[in-house]
Image (cartoon, grey):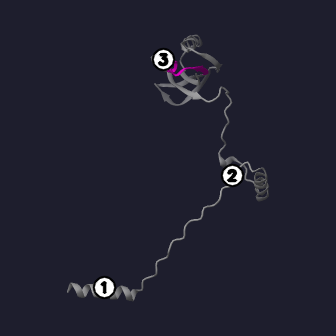
């Protein structure tokens, strides 16, 4: 048994009653344990999907076997009011997701703070130091003089004539 997450986008033109009917039908189709159910939220789509500009988003976390997920996907494909769906495997049942912040929004630290952090890491030994790899030195070829080129050209030309 694995933990799965189901995300659905329903048509934004649906009434609340019809939306709840479809949602209950989908929940009954899941054979397994429902861990967490999200609330229905209406939002505007970034681009039209099946000529719809708004949609309801619902999510559900459940535990079941992989055979039951295949059956669930078949029932989801038959429903016309579902714009899109996504079933993913979750490692844990927790719903909290950490947000990644781009580097450009993070504050730059001064050199002193960085050194203190490095010392702390060195003392604990919890992180492995990355050593800089040295690039192998390339052997430099000796420079060829113009006189040598002229001599070799003269020899070639003499042979051809």
Residue receiving disc 3? 71
Q: Mark 2 and mark 1 in contact (Cβ < 8 Å)?
A: no
- For residue 68: magenta? yes
* In the displayed structure image, the side of residue 44 where residue 70 appears, left or right: left
Tell whether 5 sits left or right of 94: left
Few, some or many C-alpha atoms within 10 Å of disc 3 (few <14, some 14-19, many ≥20)?
Answer: few
Q: Residue at x 77, y 53 (%)?
A: 117
Element assignment for label 2: loop
Q: Which residues are magenta?
A: 60-69
Q: Residue at x 60, y 61 (%)?
A: 133
Q: Quadrant of the C terminus?
A: bottom left
- Residue bearing the label numbered 2: 128
Give the answer, above or below, for where 54 lies relative to 106.
Answer: above
Image position of 124 (left or right of 84): right
* Mark earlier in primary sequence (2, 3): 3
Between 145 and 125, the residue placed more toward the observer is 125
Q: Secondary structure at mark 3?
A: helix
Residue drawn at the location 54% of the way across and 16% of the way down: 14
Label 1 packing within 10 angstroms: few (<14), some (14-19), many (20+): few
In x, y percent, where is residue 65?
Answer: 54, 20
Residue topped by disc 1: 153
Looking at the rendered image, the disc whose residue lies closer to the viewer, 1 or 2, is 2
Mark linked to residue 11: none
């Amino acid at each position: 048994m694995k933990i799965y997450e189901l995300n659905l986008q329903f048509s934004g033109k649906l009434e609340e009653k019809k939306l709840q009917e479809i949602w209950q039908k989908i929940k009954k189709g899941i054979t397994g344990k429902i861990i967490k159910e999200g609330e229905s939220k209406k939002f505007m789509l970034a681009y039209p999907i099946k000529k719809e500009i708004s949609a309801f988003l619902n999510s559900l976390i459940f535990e079941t076997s992989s055979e039951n997920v295949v059956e669930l996907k078949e029932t989801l494909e038959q429903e016309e009011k579902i714009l899109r769906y996504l079933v993913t495997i979750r490692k844990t049942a927790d719903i909290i997701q950490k947000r990644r912040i781009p580097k450009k929004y993070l504050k730059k630290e001064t050199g002193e703070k960085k050194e203190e952090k490095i010392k702390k890491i060195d003392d604990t030994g919890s992180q492995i130091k990355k050593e800089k790899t040295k690039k192998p030195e390339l052997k430099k070829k000796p420079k060829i003089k113009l006189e040598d080129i002229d001599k070799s050209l003269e020899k070639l030309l003499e042979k051809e004539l």
